[in-house]
Image (cartoon, helix red, strand yellow):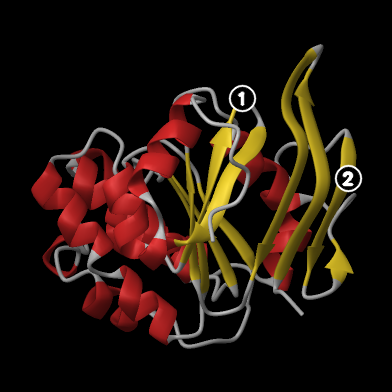
Amino acid sequence: MSLLEVEGLDARYGDFQALFGVNLSVEESVTESIIGANGAGKSTLLKTIAGVLPPSAGDIRFDGKSLVGLPPNARLALGVSLVPEGRRIFPSLSVDENLIIGAHSGRKGPWTKERIYEAFPLLQPLAKRSGARLSGGEQQALAIGRALMSNPRLLLLDEVSLGLAPIVVKQVYAALPTIMEQGTTLLVVEQDVNQALAVATRFACLLEGRISLSGDAATANRDAVTDAYFGMSSVKKDH
């Protein structure tokens, strides 16, 4: 049984429909990348899984149990944690204080402040610095660290590399294998196709709110991925 199962998922913002019958299955202890252009529905998918946006149709099952109707805090308590686009750390609080707040759900697990600082060594010398005085890359590392403090089974990462310099993106992504080693499943939204395929076990491409291609990242046909990304192919599944 998959850890996460999304079935026939529709999502709307008022009269605008953003997702159309999305089906997605994510096995435990893997990294799945969701790729697609701006407006494809990637962030909407994560928000719906996290409970920020209610679905208009379909089901979301986590460890075999439906999440539909559960608020975000209840999903967090079950082990579903979202790192939203734009990081949204607490700018007036220190790095240490942001991490402490991340542990408020009380879930037991391997992640502590010390473990976060090991995974993201760039944060350790900044423990007492306020969030407002961090660079974009430092804020992104802190946002991921804060989410990990809830000891999630499923970590949703929205646009990890957005607005960051390539060297900083490399530093942030370098921590993902360590996160997986602790048994956390990752669902990563990413526009950069090369980065998405490099980090993932599997991938799914979203186009105008629909899955246009999915498959194993290691054997993905780059031409097919490009076609699916830009809507140039009717291929539905990559084998």
Q: Quadrant of residue 22?
A: top right
Disc number lying in front (2 or 1): 1
Instruction: Identify the mark at residue 156; answer none if there is no mark.
Output: none
- Residue found 36% across the figure and 41% down from its top: 223
- Amino acid identity at mark 2: Gly
What residue does disc 2 label? 58
Q: Counting other residues with Cα less than 10 Å from the Cα at mark 2, is it few (<14), some (14-19), or many (20 or more)? A: some
Q: Position of residue 58 (x, y in %)?
A: 88, 45
* SS class, disc 1: loop
Q: Quadrant of residue 105?
A: bottom right
| Circle nearer the N terminus (2, 1) | 2
* SS class, disc 2: strand
- Residue found 17% across the figure and 60% down from its top: 171
Q: Position of residue 239 (x, y in %)?
A: 54, 61
Q: Position of residue 128 (x, y in %)?
A: 21, 60
Q: Check the image and report above or below for 220 versus 8.
A: below
Residue 59 shows in this picture: yes
In the displayed structure, does residue 112 sit left or right of residue 56?
left
- Amino acid identity at mark 1: Glu
In the displayed structure, does residue 92 sit left or right of residue 208?
left
Q: Check the image and report above or below for 105 versus 139.
A: below
* Of residues 129 and 19, the one drawn nearer to the viewer in this rendering: 19
* Of residues 80 and 181, the one drawn nearer to the viewer in this rendering: 181
Q: Check the image and report above or below for 101 versus 180.
A: above
- Residue found 83% across the figure and 38% down from its top: 55
What residue does disc 1 label? 208
Q: Quadrant of the N terminus?
A: bottom right
In the displayed structure, does residue 41 sit left or right of residue 16?
left
Between the residue at mark 2 and the residue at mark 1, the CA separation in whole angstroms equals: 18 Å
